Image (cartoon, grey):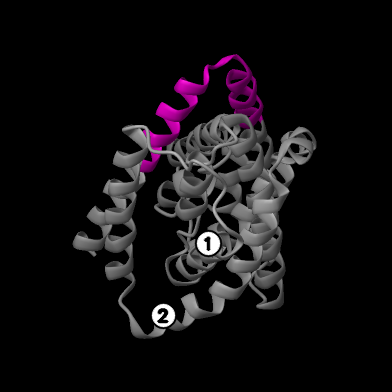
Amino acid sequence: MTAAALTILLPDMSTGAAALVFGTVFLAGFLRGFTGFGFALAAVPVITLFVEPAAVVPSIPIVAMVAGAEQLRRAWKMANWHAINRLLIGAVLGAPFGVLALTYLPANAMRAMIGLVLLFAVLALWRGYRFKQRPPTAAQIGIGITSGLLNGATAMGGPPVILFFLAAPEGVTIGRASLLVYFFFISAWSIVAQAVAGLIDLKVLVLALLMIPVMALGNVIGDRLFDRAKASTYQRVALFFLLAIGILAIARAFLG
């Protein structure tokens, strides 16, 4: 039904393309439900092959907030609020500088830098590196600034925060809960900013409404699988996905 509705919204899209779009939304929702992150990183590159980015990008935070609300209830109690507050402060401070960097620095150069940093960070985490104790406040705000800067410049602000919580001494359950809460607030901030900029129109809202039930289904299945998975399995899946993001970021930078 949702695929048929999308073909009505976008008459030039075939039923097969619509099915691929919603298959991607489901898988990205499953990934987000299991790991606590990755919906936009997994969904946007595929969806924008068929739907213009001007409609896709503003719809993603709406989908993530609404479809992921059920997870938020549990995550809210377990999350590391000490870190979340400082990361969010940094992200808000860093975003304007990211937009400024986009004006003066090639986006592909920054994507290549993100990819290389991700590869080295994933290698370190795979070899067992973890913080022995919680990093100081200044370091946490600095990571948030880096996230905000990268988000403003390349729309890829998630990896620094994801790496931070994967290396945190509190463990994967608290780290995943913290990621769910952090990205909830980032999504809310994005929706407000995009609404003020006039980027949210009827087409964006309809597209979001079509994606929400598909994403929610994948999200619920991924969430239940996490409850049965071992911490080591979670870490392997999360690191593998970050490795894929790093490789794709470098490839996109060199291929333009």
Give residue 207's position: percent from left, percent from top. 63, 51
Amino acid type at circle 2 is Ala
Q: Residue furthest top?
A: 228
- Frontmost of labels 1 and 2 is 1
Give residue 48's position: percent from left, percent from top. 44, 55
Name which residue lies at 27% across and 61% down. 112
Q: Determine whether 95 is above or below 115 in the image.
A: below
Is disc 2 surrounded by few (<14), some (14 to 19) or many (20+) residues within 10 Å? Answer: some
Give residue 11's position: percent from left, percent from top. 52, 52
Mark 2 lies on residue: 101
Q: Which residues are magenta?
A: 217-242
Picture quadrant where residue 56 is located: bottom right
Give residue 71's position: percent from left, percent from top. 72, 34
In the rendering, which numbered label is found on residue 139? Answer: 1
Nearer to me, 117 or 107: 117
| 183 lies left or right of 167 | right
- Which secondary structure lies at badge 1? helix
Q: Residue furthest left?
A: 254
Is residue 191 among what the camera can see?
yes
Nearer to me, 45 or 121: 121
- Which secondary structure lies at badge 2? helix
Name which residue lies at 60% across and 32% down. 33
Q: If the image is split into quadrants, where does the N terminus sit? A: top right
Amino acid type at circle 1 is Ala
Q: If the image is split into quadrants, where does the C terminus sit? A: bottom left
In the rendering, which numbered label is found on residue 56? Answer: none
Q: Would residue 63 be counted in the magenta stretch?
A: no
Q: Would residue 232 be counted in the magenta stretch?
A: yes
Picture quadrant where residue 221 is located: top right
Instruction: Determine the main secondary structure of the stretch shown in magenta.
Output: helix
Is disc 1 surrounded by few (<14), some (14 to 19) or many (20+) residues within 10 Å? Answer: some
Q: Determine whether 50 is above or below 239 in the image.
A: below
